[in-house]
Amino acid sequence: MCAYCDGNWVDNMDDCKSTLDYVFILGNDAINWNNNKQTSIVMSSTKVEYMAISQATRQAMWFSSLFENINVPQMKPIVKYHNNQSCIFLLKNLIFHDRMKRIEIHHLVQKSIEKGFVKLEYCNLENMVANVLIKGLSIDKHEYFQHLIGVIKCIT
C-alpha cells in the first residue's frame, strides 16, 4: 500500500482556507481518498503540507488496524509520497525543529517514521496523483492520474 498526500495552501481567496487531500493505493487501485477544506486559516504552506501528511498518517494507522483485525498481511513501511521537501525535511530532521517555532509538531508522524511504520518519499508535481483531487489539470494529466488510481470510464 502507498499513499499520495498533498495540501493546497489558501486555494480560495474568499475565505483564505487551505485544502488537504490524500489517495491510498493498494495494488493498482485507490482504496481510499479524501479532500477537505480546513476549518482554520493556516499561515504557512509547510504547515498545510504537514497537516496533509499527519492526516494521511492517521488514516494509514486505521488501515493497519483494519488489516490486522481481518488477518490480511501487511507490507511495512507504508510509503507516503509528498511534494513538499521542506515538510519532509522537517519530519525527518529532529534538530531542525527549533527553527520552526510557529509549526507545532505532531509526534504521531515522527514516531511512525522512527518505528518504520511509514516512510516519506519526495514526489514531484508531475507525478503527484493526489493532485487529481484538488488542482485544475489538463485533460491528459487528469485522465492519466485517473488511470493510476484505477478509475475507469463507464460508457452508458
Image: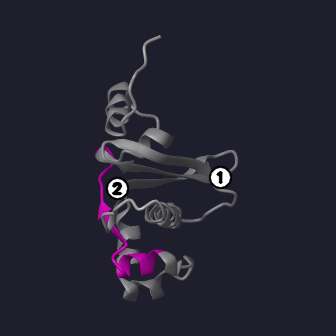
Whether the magenta-drawn stretch holds residue 82 is answered as no
Q: If the image is split into quadrants, where does the N terminus sit?
A: bottom left
Q: Residue at x 52, y 67 (%)?
A: 47
Residue placed under numbered mark 1 in the picture: 16
Q: Position of residue 68 (x, y in %)?
A: 44, 66
Q: Nearer the viewer, mark 1 or mark 2?
A: 2
Q: Position of residue 71 (x, y in %)?
A: 41, 62
Kind of residue at disc 1: Cys
Element type at marker 2?
loop
Q: Position of residue 130 (x, y in %)?
A: 42, 46
Of mark 1 and mark 2, the one earlier in the sequence is 2
Q: Which residues are magenta?
A: 109-126
Q: Is residue 77 left or right of residue 54?
A: left
**Dots 1 and 2: beta carbons under 8 Å?**
no
Q: Residue at x 33, y 33 (%)?
A: 147
Quadrant of the image occupied by residue 29? top left
Quadrant of the image occupied by residue 131? top left
Residue nearer the viewer, 84 or 118: 118
Q: Is residue 118 left or right of residue 39?
A: left
Q: What is the number of the mark on residue 1?
A: 2
Q: Is residue 43 left or right of residue 53?
A: right
Q: Counting other residues with Cα less than 10 Å from the Cα at mark 2, is it few (<14), some (14-19), or many (20 or more)?
A: some
